[in-house]
Image (tube, rainbow, N blue to C red):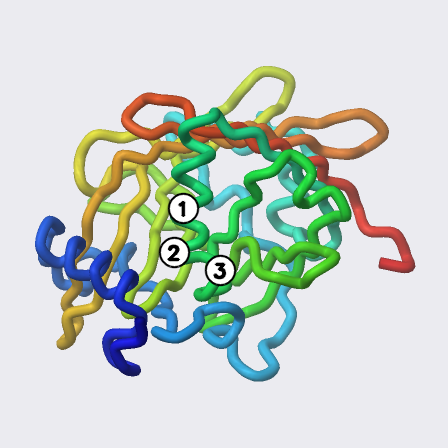
Amino acid sequence: MWLGPRRGYAIDWVTQLWVRATGRRVRLQEHPWLDAPVGATRQVGVGWLGAEPPRARGLLDSFDALASDEFDPSAVSGEVRRFYTETSAYRMDLWARWSFFAGLGARAIRAMHAEHLDQLRVPIDVMEAATGVTSDVFEVDGESAWLRRYQDSQRVIYAGVYSVFRPEGQAPMVRVAFPLPNGNCIVLLRPENADDGALRLVSKGRKFGEPGMYLTVARGNREISARRTPIAELFTVFPGSAGELRTDHVLWFYGYRMARLHYRIERKSAGD
């Protein structure tokens, strides 16, 4: 049900009311890591990118910006580092495997939200993205926006901006922000060193401002409602064979493993 351009679809508006009722009211000037692009109410898709956004090279200007007492960027494989600073030079394939009950929930959420919003359309079937995933990086307001779509249908899987933030004086983290109607979904990922030059990005935390997934809704006058969600993620990016990279992506809900996604990443050929 469409409620008008301000509220959008009824199911989306109900979700926003839930965030406003249960979330924390914050000022963006006090929590700049929550300041991110906001999506349109009818469809998010690629509209927030602008008509002709300039191309960008990678998700991060400098991988060394993540350096801290807990994380050593120089210990990460050179190919993994290059992927984050030269992302536009890579292509990827994606497979997904969900637990039975989590898969049912994911299908319901996708039907209620992702399909009409053209955003966060995470693959559910193992072979849904078998034909490949397109990967494009653009510059939006000084940040890198990464757009990934299904190769065959060109429907959006993820469209979000990537940057490095230090919330509340913590060590640098990767911040990913996905525009949603009247707000966004923000993920804070803590970098960790792993064996053999691998990189781990972890969104497990306990307190507000720590690694995790947050939903936000704009309230006006540079104020928002922000709610921390019980969803946690782990990305493990590691060198594979023949110069390719592999990524394991695990999602948990209240500690229950919902899904495991696997990416194969390789440099684009001259014809791509």
Specify the label residue 112 is tagged with. Answer: 2
Specify the label residue 172 is tagged with. Answer: none
Give the x, y percent position of residue 68. Answer: 39, 33
Q: Do the numbered discs 1 and 2 sit on residues whose CB atoms are within 8 Å?
A: yes
Q: How far apart are marks 1 and 2 (CA)?
A: 6 Å
Hey, which residue is sitting farthest top in the picture? 195
The residue beneath circle 3 is 115
Q: Is residue 83 left or right of residue 172?
A: right
The residue beneath circle 1 is 108
Q: Do the numbered discs 2 and 3 sit on residues whose CB atoms are within 8 Å?
A: no
First in sequence: mark 3 vs mark 1: 1
Neighbour tally class for label 3: few under 14, some 14-19, many 20 plus, Cα within 10 Å: some
Taking depth in this image into account, of 182 and 118 the one nearest to the observer is 118
Q: Is residue 153 left or right of residue 40?
A: right
**Label 2 element class:** helix
Q: In which quarter of the image is the C terminus?
A: bottom right
Hey, which residue is sitting farthest right in the picture? 271
Give the x, y percent position of residue 222. Answer: 17, 72
